[in-house]
Amino acid sequence: MGLSIDKMNVNGTISSEIVRMIKDNLLNGTLKPGDKLPTEKELMEQIGVSRTPVREAVKTLEAIGVIQIKRGEGMFITNNVSHFTLNPLIFSLIMHSHDMEEMIKFRQHFEVLLMNMIITQKQTDIHPIEKVYQSQTERMQPELSPEELVEIDLEFHYAVLEATNNPFVIEIGKTIYEIIKPKMIHFKNSQNIERTLATHKYYLDLISGKHEFNSSTIVQHMIKNNEEMVNE
């Protein structure tokens, strides 16, 4: 089934508009799991844009599992149905990803929700989170690249996501981190290693009950920690 190309919204970024087109085609049934997408070159010609926004859109869609790239065959809509459970919400997050300041604010409140979910569960195994944190204290070294530091940083946040045992929260959280990852890489440097580890220790102490859980205090701590990244 072919891809339906509609008029682009001038208020959005080109890459986000390409993502929106894919979303609309999925939601209206024009595209279905397993369908093959046009090549990057064909998309460029059909939409009338350059290669850069097409590649950005493809990377975003691939990162959240909407499309699969099969070497020598092309790009396909994934046929893993579980990836489509939260399509409208996930795509909504992507469509607003150009407003990074608001996205980071959303992440701050989302992470408060994560910690509250973990704390209020009857049984929670936080040992995987502790293990990741201990590993980070040894592996986050100044000589690493920003990309490497961010990958290690995100291991902690993914461990927190998994500890909620909630597939919806995990899916949303992974999408949030994929969206803000480029900003994290831009901000990350060796001087921020101590800040990152201190923040993770604070989260871990909250989850383990060493600090009183107070949502407003936690958000203020997060705002202070992220304000440089927002203004970068």
Image: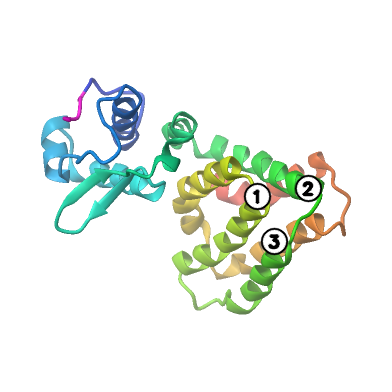
**Element type at mark 2:** loop
What is the x, y in percent for residue 75? Answer: 22, 47
For the residues carrying marks 2 and 3, which lies nearer the camera in this image?
2
Amino acid type of the residue tagged 2 in the rendering: Gln
What is the x, y in percent for residue 129? Answer: 68, 64
- The residue tagged 2 is 121
Identify the image's colour scheme: rainbow, by chain, secondary structure or one colour.
rainbow
- The residue tagged 1 is 165
**Element type at mark 3:** helix
Instruction: Describe residue 165's horizontal placement relative to residue 116 as left or right.
Output: left
- Looking at the image, is 135 positioned above or below residue 83? below
Q: Residue 197 sits in which quadrant?
A: bottom right
**Element type at mark 1:** loop
Question: What residue span does the magenta drawing correspond to?
Answer: 1-5
Q: Are marks 2 and 1 in contact (CB under 8 Å)?
A: yes
Amino acid type of the residue tagged 1 in the rendering: Asn
